[in-house]
Amino acid sequence: MFSKVGQIMLYVDNQDEAANFWTEKLGFMVTSEENNDQGMRWIELAPKKGTETTIVLHNKEVVANMSPELNLGTPSLMFYSDQFEHLHSDLQNKGITVGEIVNMPSGRVFNFADNEDNYFAVMEK
């Protein structure tokens, strides 16, 4: 049986630029960086130390060449924040594309775009 989601694979055009966005703009930390010396490199990120589910940045072109059958589209991710309005303002102040706050039946939500124009959502928790 499954016990939890361990990693979310995010396929990007430029791993270094993506890692910079997630760390410098969003405050994530690099938990590990690996390279198998055969062109496969991955960067694991987490919003804070001890987070169970991490994001792993993979080079989209390398993965497409290794496994052309894979769907390399951006996953639809929902992040939670207990400092929702502060996060919304902070992302805007950093020049990140941020959507308006929307009231949903499950709570308030906004979206933001990363450096490659992939959109993700944030929900107030």
Image (spheres, rainbow, N blue to C red):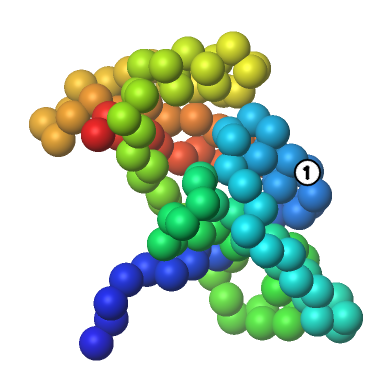
Label tally: 1
Q: Quadrant of the N terminus?
A: bottom left
76 up-or-down from 92: above or below: below
Q: Is residue 2 above or below residue 60?
A: below
Q: Secondary structure at mark 1?
A: helix
Q: Is residue 121 left or right of residue 26?
A: left
**Residue found at x 63% / y 58%:** 31
Q: Decide if residue 74 is in sight here.
A: no
Residue at label 1? 17
Residue 58 image position (x, y, % from top left): 68, 64
On the image, the x and y values in percent for residue 79 come to 38, 42
Left or right position of 72 against 124: right
Which amino acid does the dot numbered 1 rest on? Glu
Residue at figure coordinates x 32%, y 71% from the top left: 4
Q: Nearer the viewer, residue 26 or 17?
A: 26
The quadrant where residue 106 appears: top left
Does residue 19 lie above or below 107 as drawn? below
For the point 49% across and 30% down, which residue is it? 112
Q: Residue at x 64, y 17 (%)?
A: 95
Q: Residue furthest front?
A: 49
Image quadrant where residue 37 sits: bottom right
Quarter occupied by the C terminus: top left
Residue furthest to the bottom in view is: 1
Specify whether 108 is left or right of 105.
Answer: right
